[in-house]
Image: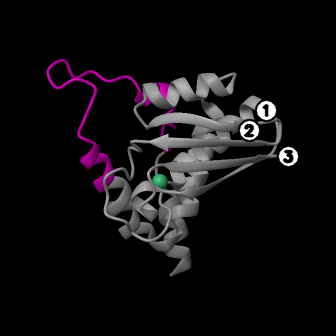
Amino acid sequence: MQTTVARRVTSLPPRKKLSVGDVSQVARPVLGADMPVALFRVVRLIAMEDILGRSVGSMLYNAGEKIGLSLDVASPAELVNLIEALKIGKVEVVEASAHRVVADVYECVTCSGLERVGYTICHFEAGLVAGALTKITRGSVFVKETRCIGGLGDPMCRMEATIK
Ligand SMILES: [Zn+2]
């Protein structure tokens, strides 16, 4: 059985690896570049959760981290601007030092307005911030979401970054 799976995987044709720049090129003259937040959430919170189960959190964190590393940002201020330009959320940096950054995200694209689910859910955003801060600081960065609007019923999602 294992051999069959391996054979099937190796026989697949090579695929182009898409970058953030690639997928940012949108040609929709009538409908435009925006879409309803609910559609994003269907993919992110329902479809991915159904397919990946409980491992979805770490996978999304890792995905966000990889994308964060590839972003064209050179400072925390540029990262804040990008997060707001992409409408991921409105960001307020509440603490910033060489070893720790704490930022609150309001109107989070993933969870703002959801009924409280009982656990934090913005793993992709946490990973994205971790990846971008890794690139900016050249340190080892871990980000933990400690407050979450839709996850825990908080007024904001709080991202706490530890930089080593
Ligand atoms: Zn959240």
Residue at image coords 80%, 45%: 140
Instruction: Judge the density around disc 2: few (<14), some (14-19), many (≥20) Cα neighbours within 10 Å.
Output: some
Instruction: Judge the density around disc 1: few (<14), some (14-19), many (≥20) Cα neighbours within 10 Å.
Output: some
Is residue 111 at all visible to an observer of this figure? yes
Quadrant of residue 154 within the rendered picture = bottom left
Query: What number is the disc on residue 110?
Result: none
Query: What number is the disc on residue 137?
Result: 1
Query: Does the CB distance between marks 1 and 2 fall below 8 Å?
Result: yes
Q: Decide which of 38, 22 is in the foreground and name it.
A: 38
Disc 3 marks a residue whose amino acid type is: Lys
Foreground label between 2 and 3:
3
Determine the secondary structure under disc 2: helix
Residue 36 covered by magenta stretch: yes
Disc 2 marks a residue whose amino acid type is: Thr
Determine the secondary structure under disc 3: loop
Can you tell me whether the CB of the residue at mark 2 lies under 8 Å from the nearest atom of ligand 1? no
Residue 119, image x, y percentages: 48, 68
Residue 82, image x, y percentages: 52, 26
Residue 69, image x, y percentages: 66, 36
Label 1 to label 2: alpha-carbon separation: 5 Å
Query: What number is the disc on residue 164?
Result: 3
Residue 77, image x, y percentages: 63, 23
Tag count? 3
Query: Does the CB distance between marks 1 and 3 fall below 8 Å?
Result: no
Indicate the colouring scheme.
one colour
Q: Which of marks 2 and 3 is nearer the N terminus?
A: 2
Disc 1 marks a residue whose amino acid type is: Thr
What's the magenta region?
A: 14-42
Q: Decide which of 94, 58 is in the foreground and name it.
A: 94
Q: Earlier in the sequence, mark 1 or mark 3?
A: 1
Query: What number is the disc on residue 134?
Result: 2
